[in-house]
Image (cartoon, rainbow, N blue to C red):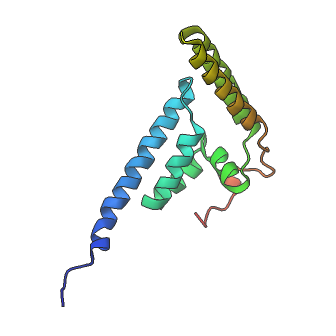
Amino acid sequence: MSSQPPIHSLMRPVRNSLYIGLAGTSFGLGVIGVFVPLMPTTCFMLLAVWSASRGSPRFARWIRHHPRFGPAILAWERERAIPRHAKLIAVAMLALSCLVLALTVTLMLVKLLLIVLLMLLGLWIVTRPEPKADMSPSSQRLSRY
């Protein structure tokens, strides 16, 4: 009999490190997305909390408790809802992105395709429900996370 640990237990630290790296990168890209048009924020934050929950539950808890990003993440996770202020910001950024595309992209077909896709994304965002409950971390018990 071998006294060596099974390979899957040796790979766990590597896997956790990869998840934490993905979470950190996604969180950083989400923060950049707050300031840069065409750069999404929420999808990167959702990816960050998903990967952090697999690699570092403590990091996932921190993201969920983050004063800026936590409420929107909790609303999405619990109700598949988007807060009104997040919708307004998203639609404004999408409109700005459409303007940038209209002024910079030279190929008409590409320009129209991108603008139509962004408009459809905006329509999808606007039609998502708004949260029914207060999603602030202080009002929620996050023990299950």
Question: x, y (%) of residue 121?
Answer: 68, 33
Location of residue 122 by image quarter: top right
Q: Provide residue 109's location: percent of width, then percent of height.
A: 60, 17
Tell me, yes or no, if residue 89 can be seen here. no
Q: Is residue 83 above or below residue 107?
A: below
Q: Quadrant of the C terminus?
A: bottom right
Q: Choose between 70 and 104: the one closer to the eye.
A: 104
> Residue 117 appears in which quarter of the rendering?
top right
Whether residue 13 is situated above or below residue 6 in the rendered picture: above
Pick the front one: 7 or 31: 7
Hey, which residue is sitting farthest bottom in the picture? 1
Residue 59, given in percent of the width and then of the height, sits at 47, 54
> Is residue 58 something one can see in this rendering?
yes
The one of 16 and 7 positioned closer to us in this rendering: 7
For the point 79% across and 44% down, the residue is 130
Residue 125's x, y, as percent?
72, 37
Residue shown at 76% from the left, 42% from the top: 128
Query: Looking at the picture, does residue 66 appear above or below residue 57?
Result: above
Residue found farthest to the front: 109
Judged left or right of residue 51, residue 4 is left
- Looking at the rendering, which quadrant does residue 96 occupy? top right
* Number of numbered discs: 0
Residue at 31% x, 73% y is: 9
| Residue 143 located left or right of residue 60 | right
Query: If the image is split into quadrants, where does the N terminus sit?
Result: bottom left
Q: Is residue 3 left or right of residue 62?
A: left
Please tell me which residue is depicted at 56% across the width and 47% down the height of the picture: 46
